[in-house]
Structure formats: structure tokens, C-alpha cells
């Protein structure tokens, strides 16, 4: 489950259970050059690249930049094209409303001949595919799906479009919704997600996949005759672990099974020669902790081959043009261990023998694309204290060139120093983390230390200005760590057992044992920094959201060493998350079902030990969080309050597992900054 984690124009601050000002919306300028401190308003002005695609000829790169707008209370995406040789970018189609509900998801592509780029844009209230001529001219709406488009791909000859859409609402349901007699029934099947194909310029689309399947991705064969796709026979949180790979004639017909086995089998991509299909798979295991490996199967059918790379979790990949190798980006595994745990480099894997080599770094890479001649890769590159920029890699020489400057203000900002550190835990296991220290911290002076626990449990941190959220719009981070560092705090981002970086065996070390070895790993890191003279033992704080919120709740029931704590989207009673969450089976993989393991559920739930809390605790929760429902936050708050503990509770209307609205993101960051500076003194 990974417990990490159209808007109104004017939004007030979150409803809270404390007294304080309500912040009015305002326009923010970008960070002023030369300004040393990155304040919360400066963080909310930073831009992020959310999609990258290189042109077929490799001479241009299209990308989408998202900018938070407090005035609109949304993250506003903008489309640009820049020459591969560098130079000023050119903005395209300013009037096109690129899809951004609840966050930007452009699904950027080039037309096969390279004359247009396409995105998913809001047309009326529905997302549709819109093509934009690169040389100028009016954007062109390509689809008119009644229920909108959620993913798509151009045919190799550029004459057709295949896209994902949902079946229309049945007339009876539409009527009952209109007269308010509609009733939601638990576990009722969702309308299927299906593939439709239409000729470019035609308003007629043909649905080609059966109504019994929920399709999540697709890929045209190089000759344009067939589409490979991944689909489950059900919807819901666990549907991803029931996906299979199918092929279907582009002109219609019955689908054929290419990979028919249990577990996750998703994201198929044909090799350029059409002989093989690569995909991401848990290799027959319907388990959340199973590694998501690069896997290849013959396109005609046959046994899959797994490229495990030592438990690497593959996030994305692209075929080399000669079909002899694959470029991928992953966390964990061979190229993301020890001091490289915080990187996600591009790795080239040989199809013939499975040998793998890292081809760039140290960095975090996203949105990998390759030119038709195979000479150039383009991607978003993130370094230790950046928001990420476009990078172009010459495959032959290995030379990488940065060709964008999305946040020039950061060149003149002092953002602190981030570096990997390691320590030994209670059982001798080497544990890693990132340490952020304030800019110009005086040598020899102990610093107030905040411990930031990641979500997951199988999550982790990477390089970047927002180390947990560089893969999405990063302002979803509740904790303004650059501002906290600028104000004098050191911040430890620990990677305890149970999370990424230690393989599947490391994740399974906390099965039936949340809050045990992982807690001791974190405290060993704190002890190390105190022993080294970095951290002041009398000025410690702890924070985290989702699983990090659970760990924060747990930590304050186990020790009184911390002077302040902030828990976001956190669990307090583990059984709640089995019964109330959208992904209740997630808890069963760690603890079994509550009625089978009552004692352990209670023994690892913070609420069981609420009477021990002495640390002032701020609880923050989205009102409609489906992943960790707010009921648990209410239970912990009321328990602590009735016991006379120091606790405050902020509720964010419309908020989910993370907050998507810039006004709420800004309020949450400011609130956490105020909370820690209230309870922990900074020189």
C-alpha cells in the first residue's frame, strides 16, 4: 500500500482545533536572488518538472513545468520545448488547460513524425488528448471520450490513437443519481477501464477490450497490428497485484494471454523489433513486499525472464533502439545500496545475459526517454539540493548536459548541506540516513535535531530539496525542511529496516514487529549524532507522515527524549487500518488479520501506550484520507486530551492522504515550522 502517503479560487486555512490566524490567499513572487533563507513562501514559489519527452529525432525536448498558484489554489502546469543543444525554452499552447486534478498528469508524448506534442488536457470537465503543433498553430482536440481519457499512445504510423477510458454510466444509474435515489453498495464493481482506438481526425472510437477487464496500461506493436496491455479482473487497491499481460488485434477481436500468472504484471512495452515485451512484475507473487522486477517475455508467448538486480524495485524503463538492452530507473537493489541508497540512477541491462551497468550519477532520474536513433536519453535529473532539471545524455560518450534552469533562484539561495551518513544499530546492522545541516553552521556547536521518518513502511528518501517527494509535485511534503535548516535545525532522514535500501529481506524484518527494530534503528542514529557532538540531546524533535506518522506516534509513547513531535496521516490503532482503510489487506501482510493476531495488533499500536506520552504532539490529518482514515487520529487525540497530555489536532477539509491544494500545503508547512520553533529553541 505504501502508507506514505476543480478547486475553488479562494480557500481559507485548514479547520483546526487550536487558536491561530486564518491565512488569506496571496500571490507569491519567486525567491529573490541573493536571499539566504528559503522561507515557506519561497518553497511555495518553486517550480517542478512533472513530465519529459525527447523528440523522435533527438533534437528537441518537450517538458511540463508545474507552478503552485495560491490565487487559483492549484498546481498550474505549462508546456515547453527546448533545443537539445540548449538555449531558451519556448512555451507552447498557453491556453490549453493541462490536466492537473488533483495534481498535474500531462501524459506528454510526441507524434511519431515529430511535428506535434500531445497532452491530456481538461476540455470542459473531462480530460481529453490534445495535440499542439510545435511550429505554431492552434491546438487540436483528438478525443471526445464521454468519460474522459486516462492514458493513451500514438500508433507507430501516427494515424491512430489508442486510449484508456471508462465505460459510460448506465442510464438507470444516471437517472437515480439525478433524482438522488442512488445508493452506493459496498464492494460493488466499478465500471471497467477499457482501450478505445480511433483514427486521427475521426470522432468515432471503437472499444476493443472486454468489459470484464480493468486495463491500466498499453503499448502498440512496432508494426501497428497489435496492442499489448495489462489488466486485472477487478478494481480496487489490490487490483494491481492481479494484473496479466494480453495482446489484442488493433482491428478488434478476442484478446490473447501473453503472461497469465498471479501477482503484478504491468506496464508492457514492445521491443523495437517486436519480438519481446518488457514489463514490471512481482513474478507470480501477489504480495506487497515482493520486488517489482524488470521482466521480459516473447511477444508470441512463452516463459518470462526476470532481471532481478538484487531486489531492485523498477519504476520505469525504456528499450534501446537495437532491442538488445533496456534502460531502467529503480530504487533499492544493486545500484541503490549503502551510500548510494538515496540515488536512482539510469542502469542499462543487457537482454542477452542480464549484465547491468550504471550509466550516470550520482543523481535521481525520472521520466526517461530515448531518441529514435538511440543516441540520446532525456530525463529529469535531481541532485542533492535541487528541484530537478532536464538532462540530456549522449549514450556513446556517457556525457550528460543540463539544458534547463527551472529554478534559477536556487543558485543564490543557501539550502544547507545534505550528505549520507551511516551508523550501527542494536544488532550490528548498518543503517543509513541523510543528514541535513544548516548553512554555515558553526563548527563545534551542538544543533537542535529533528528526526523525519519516511512513509511506507517500504518507502524512503532520495536526493533533492524535498527528499521524500521528488517524484511528484514536492510541495505535498508537510515539513519545510529547507526552512527549518535555514533557521538552525539539523534534520536526520533515517532509513530504518523495513524500508527501501535493504532488499526484501530488510522489509520483512518488521513483519509482525512495527515499532521494534525500526524504532531502535532510528534511536541509534540519534544516539550517534549526539555522541558525535552534532545533536543537542536536550533539543530533539520528531516528525513524519503516513507510516512516518505511525512511527512518530509510536516514538512518543516509548521515550520522553523528544521535546516536540508532529504526526501527519498517522496510525494509532493498527486494527483500524485493516477495517477502515481502502487497502486493509496491506495490514494483513504484516500482521495477519486482527481477529487472528489480536495481541500483536494491540502491542504495536501507539494508542495502547498513550498514558506514557510526555512530548507535546501535533496531529495533522486530511478529512477524507482513504488510506489512513481520520477516525484513528480522532481516537488518539481524544485519548491524549482526556489524559491531560499536550496535544493539538489540525483537520484539513477535502484533504486526502497528502494535501494537494497549495493553500493547504502552505498552511501545513507554516504550522509545522511554528510548532517546532515554539517548543525547541534555536540559537
Image (cartoon, grey):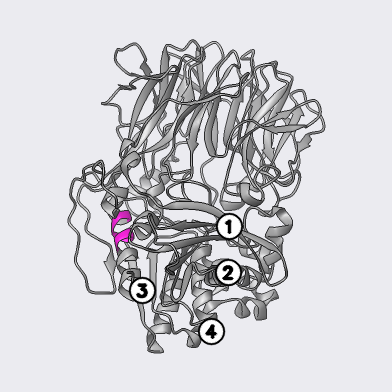
Residue mark closest to the camera, 1 vs 3:
1
Magenta segment's dominant SS is: helix
Q: Earlier in the sequence, mark 2 or mark 1?
A: 1
Pointer 4: what residue?
A: 609
User: What residue do we see at 78% from left, 32% from top?
Assistant: 354
Left or right of residue 42, residue 145 in this image: right
Pointer 3: what residue?
A: 680
Quarter of the picture containing the C terminus is: bottom left
Pointer 1: what residue?
A: 421
Pointer 2: what residue?
A: 528
Residue 561, compared with residue 309, is above or below; it is: below
Dot 3 crowding, Cα within 10 Å, few <14, some 14–19, many 20+? some
Residue mark closest to the camera, 3 vs 4:
3
- The answer to which of 130 and 291 lies nearer the viewer is 291
Q: Earlier in the sequence, mark 1 or mark 4?
A: 1
Q: CA distance from mark 1 to mark 3?
A: 24 Å
Residue 163 visible in this rendered orientation of the protein: no
Secondary element under disc 3, as helix, strand or loop, is loop
Residue mark closest to the camera, 4 vs 2:
2
Dot 4 crowding, Cα within 10 Å, few <14, some 14–19, many 20+? some
Q: Earlier in the sequence, mark 3 or mark 2?
A: 2
Whether the residues at callouts 1 and 4 have beta carbons within 8 Å, the answer is no
What residue range appears in magenta?
665-670
Whether the residues at callouts 2 and 1 have beta carbons within 8 Å, the answer is yes
User: What residue do we see at 42% from left, 48% from top?
Assistant: 465
Amino acid at each position: 500500500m505504501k502508507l506514505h502517503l476543480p478547486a475553488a479560487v479562494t480557500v481559507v486555512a485548514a479547520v483546526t482545533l487550536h487558536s491561530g490566524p486564518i491565512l488569506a490567499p496571496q500571490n507569491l513572487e519567486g525567491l529573490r536572488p541573493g536571499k539566504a533563507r528559503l522561507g515557506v513562501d519561497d518553497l511555495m514559489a518553486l517550480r517542478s518538472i512533472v513530465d519529459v519527452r525527447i523528440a523522435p529525432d533527438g533534437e528537441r525536448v518537450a517538458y511540463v513545468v508545474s507552478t503552485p498558484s495560491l490565487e487559483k489554489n492549484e498546481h498550474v502546469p505549462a508546456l515547453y520545448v527546448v533545443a537539445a543543444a540548449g538555449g531558451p525554452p519556448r512555451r507552447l499552447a498557453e491556453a490549453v488547460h493541462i490536466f492537473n486534478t488533483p495534481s498535474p498528469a500531462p501524459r506528454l508524448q510526441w507524434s511519431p513524425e515529430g511535428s506535434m506534442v500531445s497532452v491530456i488536457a481538461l476540455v470542459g470537465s473531462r480530460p481529453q488528448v490534445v495535440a499542439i503543433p510545435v511550429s505554431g498553430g492552434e491546438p487540436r482536440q483528438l478525443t471526445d471520450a464521454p468519460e474522459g481519457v486516462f492514458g493513451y499512445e500514438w500508433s507507430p504510423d501516427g494515424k491512430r490513437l489508442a486510449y484508456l477510458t471508462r465505460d459510460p454510466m448506465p442510464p438507470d444509474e444516471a437517472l437515480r443519481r439525478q433524482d438522488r435515489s442512488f445508493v452506493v453498495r459496498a464492494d460493488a464493481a466499478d465500471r471497467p477501464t477499457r482501450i478505445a482506438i480511433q483514427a486521427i481526425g475521426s470522432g468515432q472510437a471503437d472499444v476493443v477490450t472486454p468489459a470484464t477487464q480493468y486495463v491500466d496500461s498499453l503499448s502498440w506493436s512496432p508494426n501497428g497490428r497489435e496492442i499489448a496491455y495489462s489488466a486485472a479482473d477487478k478494481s480496487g487497491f489490490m487490483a494491481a497485484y492481479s494484473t496479466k499481460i494480453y495482446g489484442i488485434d488493433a482491428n478488434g477481436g478476442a484478446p490473447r494471454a501473453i503472461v497469465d500468472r498471479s501477482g503484478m504484471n504491468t506496464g508492457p512495452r514492445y521491443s523495437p523489433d517486436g519480438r519481446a515485451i518488457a514489463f514490471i512484475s512481482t513474478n507470480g507473487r501477489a504480495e506487497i513486499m515482493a520486488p517489482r522486477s524488470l521482466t521480459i517475455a516473447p511477444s508470441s508467448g512463452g516463459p518470462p525472464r526476470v532481471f532481478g538486480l538484487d531486489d531492485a524495485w523498477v519504476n520505469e524503463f525504456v528499450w534501446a533502439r537495437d532491442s538488445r538492452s533496456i534502460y531502467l530507473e529503480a530504487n533499492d537493489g544493486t545500484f541503490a545500496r549503502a551510500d548510494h541508497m538515496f540515488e536512482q540512477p539510469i542502469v542499462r541491462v543487457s537482454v542477452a545475459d542480464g549484465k547491468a551497468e550504471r550509466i550516470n550519477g550520482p543523481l535521481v532520474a525520472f521520466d526517461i526517454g530515448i531518441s529514435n536513433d538511440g543516441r540520446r536519453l532525456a530525463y529529469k535529473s535531481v541532485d542533492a539540493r535541487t528541484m530537478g532539471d532536464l538532462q540530456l545524455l549522449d549514450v556513446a560518450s556517457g556525457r550528460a548536459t543540463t539544458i534547463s534552469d527551472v529554478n534559477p533562484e536556487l543558485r543564490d539561495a543557501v539550502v544547507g548541506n545534505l550528505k549520507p551518513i551511516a551508523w550501527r544499530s542494536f544488532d550490528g546492522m548498518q543503517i543509513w540516513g541523510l543528514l541535513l545541516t544548516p548553512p554555515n553552521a558553526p563548527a563545534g556547536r551542538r544543533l537542535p535535531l529533528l528526526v523525519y521518518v519516511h512513509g511506507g513502511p517500504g518507502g524512503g528518501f532520495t536526493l533533492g530539496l524535498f527528499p521524500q517527494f521528488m517524484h511528484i509535485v514536492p510541495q505535498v511534503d508537510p515539513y519545510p525542511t529547507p526552512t527549518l535548516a535555514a533557521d538552525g535545525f539539523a534534520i536526520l532522514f533515517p532509513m530504518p529496516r523495513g524500508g527501501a535500501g535493504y532488499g526484501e529481506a530488510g522489509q520483512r524484518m518488521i513483519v509482525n514487529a512495527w515499532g521494534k527494530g525500526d524504532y531502535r534503528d532510528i534511536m541509534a542514529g540519534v544516539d550517534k549524532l549526539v555522541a558525535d557532538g552534532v545533536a543537542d540531546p536536550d533539543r530533539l524533535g520528531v516528525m513524519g507522515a503516513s507510516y512516518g506518522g505511525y512511527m512518530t506516534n509510536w516514538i512518543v509513547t516509548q521515550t520522553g527524549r523528544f521535546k516536540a513531535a508532529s504526526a501527519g496521516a498517522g496510525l494509532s490503532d493498527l486494527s483500524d487500518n485493516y477495517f477502515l482503510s481502502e487497502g486493509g489487506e496491506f495490514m494483513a501482510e504484516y500482521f495477519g488479520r486482527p481477529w487472528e493476531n489480536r495481541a500483536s495488533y494491540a502491542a504495536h499500536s501507539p494508542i495502547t501506550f498513550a498514558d506514557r506520552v510526555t512530548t507535546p504532539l501535533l496531529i495533522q490529518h486530511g478529512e477524507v484520507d482513504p488510506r489512513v482514515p481520520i477516525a484513528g487520529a480522532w481516537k488518539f487525540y481524544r485519548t491524549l486530551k482526556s489524559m491531560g497530555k499536550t496535544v493539538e489536532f489540525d483537520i484539513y477539509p477535502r484533504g486526502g492522504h497528502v494535501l494537494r491544494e497549495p493553500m493547504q500545503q502552505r498552511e501545513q508547512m507554516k504550522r509545522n515550522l511554528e510548532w517546532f520553533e515554539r517548543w525547541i529553541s534555536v540559537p
